[in-house]
Amino acid sequence: MPVNDFEKQVQQKLDELQLRPSPAVWTDVEKQIRKEKKRRRVIIFWWLLPLLLTGAGAGYYFTQVKSSKPTSATQLPTNQKNTAEDTEQNLTRKSNNTQSNILQKEEQQSITGATTPSSTTTATKDEKKLDYQRQVGKDPGQLIVTSQSATLQKKKKNPAANTIADAKPIQEKEIVKVNAPTVTNPEYPELLTSTEPYEKEKTSLSVTMDSVKVTAPVDPPKEVALDEPVTAQTNNPGPIKITRNKWQLGVEFRPGLSNTIDGPLFDGQKSMNLYSQPNSSPGNITSSVPFAPPVLISSPERGFSAALEIFARKSLSKRWEFQGGLQYQYLSTYIEVGSHVASSRQLNNDMSAGIVVDNYYNAPNTGTGNNSYTNQYHLLGISASMSWNIIYKKKFLLSWDNGFTYGKLISTNALLFDPTSRSYYQDFNAFKKTQFSLNTGLTFPVWSNKAFTLAIHPFASYTLSPVLKEAERNMQFVNYGVGFKFLLPPKK
Amino acid sequence: MDERQLVKDCLKEKPEAQRQLYELFAKNMLGICYRYTKSYKDAEDVLQEGFVKVFFGLKQFKFEGELGAWIRRIMVNTALNFLKRNKKYRDEMYFTEQPLHPVADGNPVVSLQAKELADLIRQLPHGYQTIFNLHAVEGYTHVEIGEMLGISDGTSRSQYARARAILISWIEEISVEQKKQNYAGQ
């Protein structure tokens, strides 16, 4: 009997072996397929999110720009603006050196109803007052009594209807400086109210008419400087000086770690072997086998990475910032290889057809004599990102950055594996030159002086483009670490 | 439904086609997974993992070979990954090169059933079991096995010889027992 008959018999026998799996297996398979499908959708959505945020940020910015134009054109002090608005509603009374008497008289008249003609000409007088106020502008002694006079004028015929509830709207009005209204009733001169300014908290405004005394609390003058231009810099003097519409230049150094991982299709596991390619499986393995066998080639281990970026950033609003820049990026991974051979060899595989290499490395052995080899990748690229200020406080600022980098692989010494000759070799043409990556990270300033601001930037980056042109195993770079941003003061 | 159409439907993620593909190959594939593992549950775990890979990698099947052979390859690779990943297998799967002895030249007639033979193979030490399966059943050369397991081809060769010898001795013992039983039965 020939020597191989035993093997043939075993092969035949075992080919017949059929075992029925329990129903749970299919249930789990099905569950995993669906779950993986969902997971991939989530991943896609997750990476779309920065784009959506970018779009939303841009939209918000342009909306802000449009809506802020008229405001910035007028830039009136708030109390002036309020006065003008109130006057337009015929609800403002103003007392000052020249007009107070007239106004007081009008007030008296309007409350007592003594002079009917004056009430008929109210609109004309109000217009005059408006003109006057526009001319006078900011007057520290101005009186702004809203709505009540008009209300009282309307209701004077029915004093019983004048309740405290009627006076409540006064509380809602923001009054910067209020002089007491001089409202008198000729029948009860002793009820003449004081003209002391209302500078105490919750000072009451007494308005007396006929026999009803209405006392309404008046809010204290608010010290909020609303008349100052509203800028993030004024209100939030954080370590990073946020100056809207001004570009800020900076430099960032990003040390970290990089590696190559399998794509989502392969459960996100770390690549068993980046350089073992389709068709590498010998023997009866068909060329369409997507999973190269886990051979002796060591897994790529993570290596050092670094990036240097020159960027310009612009604050679009209190919450949104845009950043764009140019960057150089260095990525690396470690693999274990065998001995170096300094002689030429022709290789023929899917990635490198008919290439002749001057030198190569043997596959590593199980014993000694192996070397650690650093696959180095050098990339140049442009980046853009949108930052959203999650925390925006006086003492602390934290922003979440999302963006992308469009990079070009400019050189690499990374090794590829040729399964036929069991050797590692270099072939720059086998690598995909264009690398598109998505970046995310947090930024928080830690130190600032007049010259620059230093911000810490923990980041993670995932390259969507595969590392190799012909790779069926969808492997990408991952890169993570902590960056240091140096921001120059805003351009004046 | 022919395989091509079945694959196309699976690529369209039709649940009934996926189920059909599974039904078509699950029994055979579980037989393969069974040979590489030590327990039925582990075999089913490998089968499950393998089929998930099959469904996600199906778009890479170009009809250049038989679908069954392609799935089989995935199952074998999944099984090897499973062994490497699983501590209870990994710790016992050590390979040492042993001197070749002329002990593996027997060629007994294998009168066992497939399941009995598979059970015998599963009783081999982990390393022997794996190498025996890869060489005798899957048909890999020792060089290829060496690459797959990270060992030298010599180690693979010697381990296989040992495995073969042990297995033959067991088969012969069983044959003798069977003969005795048959004789006693007569």
Image (cartoon, grey):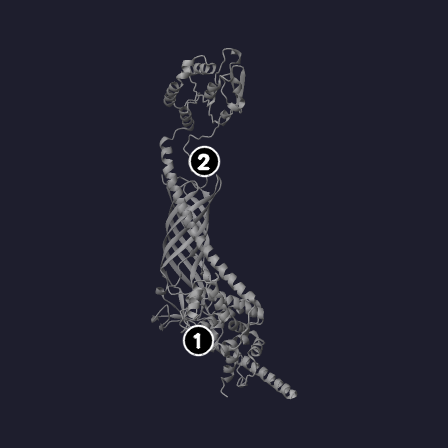
Read off the residue under disc 2.
Answer: A235
Q: CA distance from mark 1 to mark 2?
A: 72 Å
Describe residue A436's horizontal placement relative to residue A205 as left or right: left
- Chain where mark 2 sits: A
- Looking at the picture, how far across and down is residue B106, in whole percent? 54, 86
- Chain where mark 1 sits: A
- Looking at the picture, how far across and down is residue A293, in whole percent? 46, 70
- Which of discs 1 and 2 lies nearer the camera? The answer is 1
Q: Residue furthest right?
A: B184
Q: Which of the two residues, B94 or A449, is positioned nearer the viewer here?
A: B94
Residue A284 shows which numbered tag? 1
- Looking at the picture, how far across and down is residue A300, in whole percent? 46, 64
* Residue A299 visible: no
Q: Which of the two residues, A283 or B182, is positioned nearer the viewer here?
A: B182
The vertical placement of A326 against B13, above or below, is: above
Amino acid found under the numbered disc labelled 2: Asn
Q: Which of the two residues, B131 or A344, is positioned nearer the viewer here?
A: B131
